[in-house]
Image (spheres, rainbow, N blue to C red):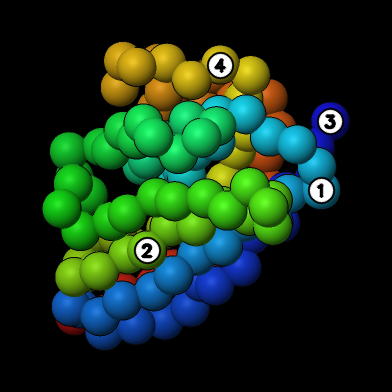
Amino acid sequence: QVQLVESGGGSVQSGGSLRLSCAASGYTYSMGWFRQTPGKEREGVAAISRDGSSTIYADSVKGRFTISRDNAKNTLYLQMNSLKPEDTAMYYCASGNIFYRSSYDSLRAGTYHSWGQGTQVTVSS
């Protein structure tokens, strides 16, 4: 199984930006970003196909977040702009075997088989 390591989290004020990275130890196919706060289920944020031509976003982040990948570097990114306090969470990257064109499947945690340890994002008002 591929190993995933997230980085780039931190504390930022509302309206600020952060860029998360996820380094993979090898080949990955579909990839996604998820986030989770204590007591809540893991929420799908964005997903991307192997070649990067297809992306899916949760409604809560559309227009503010951008998912991208550099396959030569085995790295996944999440550019987060116009951050809000409600974006505060632990962010995880994940790798799967299939890219689903439906947002329900691509943003569902059960679709993915490999997970990183997470990086904390805190947005203050």
Looking at the image, can residue 44 be seen? Answer: no
Would you say the residues marked 1 and 2 are in contact, meaning their CB atoms lie under 8 Å apart? Answer: no
Q: Specify few, some or many for label 3: CA neighbours under 10 Å numbering under 14, 14-19, or 20 or more.
A: few
Judge depth for marks 3 and 4 and give the one in front. 4
Residue drawn at (31%, 33%), measured in percent from left and top?
56
Residue drawn at (41%, 81%), measured in percent from left and top?
11
From the image, tell me which residue sits under label 2.
79
Mark 2 or 4, nearer chain start: 2
Would you say the residues marked 4 and 1 are in contact, meaning their CB atoms lie under 8 Å apart? Answer: no
From the image, tell me which residue sits under label 3.
1
In the displayed structure image, the side of residue 69 where residue 19 appears, left or right: left
Where 47 sits versus 69, above or below?
above
Three-letter amino acid code at disc 2? Gln
Q: Specify few, some or many for label 1: CA neighbours under 10 Å numbering under 14, 14-19, or 20 or more.
A: some
Three-letter amino acid code at disc 1? Ser
For the C terminus, which image quadrant? bottom left
- SS under mark 3: loop
From the image, tell me which residue sits under label 1.
25
Three-letter amino acid code at disc 3? Gln
Looking at the image, can residue 70 be seen? Answer: yes
Residue drawn at (63%, 47%), measured in percent from left and top?
71
Mark 1 or 2, nearer chain start: 1
Q: Nearer the viewer, residue 12 or 63?
A: 63
For the N terminus, which image quadrant? top right
